[in-house]
Amino acid sequence: MLLIGSHVGFKKDSQLLGSLQEALSYGANTFMFYTGAPQNTMRYKIDNNLTKEALALMEKEHLDYSKVIVHAPYIVNLANSDNIDKYNFAINFIKSEVKRCEELGIKYMVLHPGSHVGCGIEEGINNIINGLNKVLGDTSVTILLETMAGKGSEVGSKLEEIQKIINGVSDKDHIGVCLDTCHLNDAGYDIENFDKFLENFDTLIGIDKIKCIHINDSKNEKSSHKDRHENIGFGHIGFDTLINIIYNEKLESIPKILETPYVDREYPPYKYEIEMIKEKKFDNNLLEKIKSQ
């Protein structure tokens, strides 16, 4: 069964229930959210009553809660420990996000590995391993390392870097991978031949470690290392390539999450992109149609 959804909001007054209602309005059967603002570390208390209401509605809608994803804020950085206070803050904040996931009953949390910021790729990888080993080991939540575009000093744009991190983590049962199609393209991977990519991934890491896929087109050509998402079918990856990834039989049970940009920064595209994906038919007039609704 196709598991398709998008990033949705998580607001103080509606929390998980509001996230679910937004996802359902898009025709989604899964979704991803931040448990607070992605650009800061301020968090408010989880409302268990709202969580219970959301779980009841999910059951009614036959939505598999085990496939819902949380994304950690992208401002915390485990790859650089030059400022030990910032590094320890990042570790402790990720610990607190994991606890919020546990409170919400979420199984998977996506994490950007981080940027080494001049300390070097090997030291950056070791910093990430050290940080993850302080977070994992006493949690039911699996952290999914996101494949990155290679912008600046990002760690994780090469599968070999992800492999080294996973190999260094002690709790192998709670570490996995989130593929991002835009990031893979911008990092230089040929995802037009996605089966060959998966063969390489399986050899290096193991295909069983893939637990989520971010489905995004890219504003940039392959190997650009820029990380700029585009709406489905309107970028350099293209609709057919993305459809082949979404419907790959080896990844049938993996949730696919759209993180495509709002049209004119105002109109969410997800309902219409999900319709295109379900119908496997590209609509070249999609962006104009979204703006006219």
Image (cartoon, helix red, strand yellow):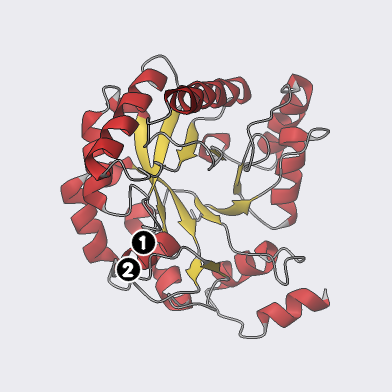
Residue extending farthest to the top is 138
Using residue 128 as the reference point, say whether residue 7 is left or right of it.
Answer: right
Quick check: 62 above or below 281? Answer: above
The amino acid on which the numbered mark 2 sits, given as a three-letter code, is: Ile
Quick check: 279 above or below 10? Answer: below
- Counting every numbered tag in the picture gives 2
Residue on which the image places disc 2? 191
Nearest the camera: 277 or 270? 270
* SS assignment at label 1: helix
Q: Nearer the viewer, mark 1 or mark 2?
A: 1
Q: Position of residue 224 (x, y in %)?
A: 38, 71
Marks 1/2 in contact by CB < 8 Å: the verdict is yes
Nearest the camera: 264 or 237? 264
Using residue 266 as the reference point, say whether residue 192 is left or right of it.
Answer: left
Query: How far apart in space, not on screen, are marks 1 and 2 (Cα)?
Result: 7 Å
Using residue 147 as the reference point, say whether residue 120 is left or right of it.
Answer: left
Instruction: Answer whether residue 95 is visible to the viewer in this image.
Output: yes
Q: Position of residue 146 (x, y in %)?
A: 41, 47
Residue on which the image places disc 1? 184
Identify which residue is drawn at 33% across, 48% down.
Answer: 156
Identify which residue is drawn at 40% across, 58% down.
Answer: 151
Identify which residue is drawn at 46% across, 39% down.
Answer: 111
Instruction: Answer whether residue 247 is visible to the viewer in this image.
Output: no
Q: Position of residue 173 (x, y in %)?
A: 32, 26
- Crowding at label 1, few (<14), some or many (≥20) Cα neighbours within 10 Å? many
* SS assignment at label 2: loop
Q: Position of residue 257 (x, y in %)?
A: 54, 53
On residue 7, the disc is none
The amino acid on which the numbered mark 1 sits, given as a three-letter code, is: Leu
Q: Earlier in the sequence, mark 1 or mark 2?
A: 1
Residue extending farthest to the bottom is 284
Quick check: 11 above or below 154? Answer: above
